[in-house]
Image (tube, helix red, strand yellow):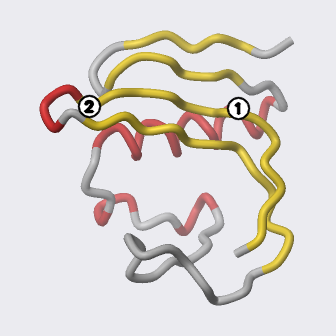
């Protein structure tokens, strides 16, 4: 996958497992069929086809739900916090 990164979208920690996630908003430029060592597979979905019941982490589900809403509105924010609480800072 080759992508053009547009902006950071979500930066949050998961204190229980001592991890920090940085998620970017990006545009796919080329689907190469190659992915990183932590990825078993990937697939693109239209919002109405997302398999919500298959998403294990609540934080990832919330990020996707927020992205769909913000994409429809055309206004994007950056979430900063942890997997439980945080704040969305809107880009102007």
First in sequence: mark 1 vs mark 2: 2
Q: Position of residue 11 (x, y in %)?
A: 50, 28
Q: Neighbour class for label 2 at 10 Å: few (<14), some, many (≥20)?
A: some
Screen quadrant of the N terminus: bottom right
Q: Between label 1 and label 2, give the one nearer the viewer.
A: 2
Q: Is residue 86 left or right of residue 54?
A: right
**In the figure, 4 relative to 49: above or below?**
above
Write the residue at 42% across / 76% down.
Answer: 37
In the rendered image, residue 29, in percent from the top left (x then y), is placed at 86, 70
Dot 2 lies on which element? Answer: strand
The residue lying at 33 percent from left, 28 percent from top is: 13
Q: Is residue 19 left or right of residue 34?
A: left
- Residue 81 position, x and y percent, is 41, 16
Q: In terms of depth relative to the viewer, which is nearer, 22 or 57?
A: 22
Quadrant containing the C terminus in the rendered view = top right
Say which quarter of the image contains residue 27: bottom right
Residue at the location (84% across, 31% down)?
74
Coordinates of residue 77 in the picture (x, y in percent): 68, 22
Task: Measure the C-alpha gap from mark 1 to mark 2.
Answer: 24 Å
Q: In the image shown, does 32 or 27 lie closer to the viewer? A: 32
Residue drawn at the location 30% of the way across and 66% of the way down: 54
Which residue corresponds to mark 1? 70
Q: Which residue does the numbered mark 2 point to in the structure image? A: 14
- Could you say which quadrant of the image residue 86 lies in? top left
Image-quadrant location for residue 75: top right
Q: Contact (CB < 8 A) between labels 1 and 2? A: no
Q: Is residue 65 above or below residue 81?
A: below
Residue 20, numbered label: none
């Amino acid at each position: 996958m080759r992508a053009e990164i547009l902006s950071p979208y979500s930066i949050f920690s998961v204190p229980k497992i001592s991890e920090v996630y940085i998620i970017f908003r990006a545009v796919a430029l080329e689907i190469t069929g190659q992915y990183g060592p932590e990825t078993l597979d990937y697939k693109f979905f239209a919002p109405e086809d997302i398999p919500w019941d298959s998403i294990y982490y609540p934080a990832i589900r919330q990020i996707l739900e927020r992205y769909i809403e913000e994409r429809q509105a055309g206004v994007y924010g950056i979430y900063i916090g942890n997997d439980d609480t945080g704040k969305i800072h809107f880009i102007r």
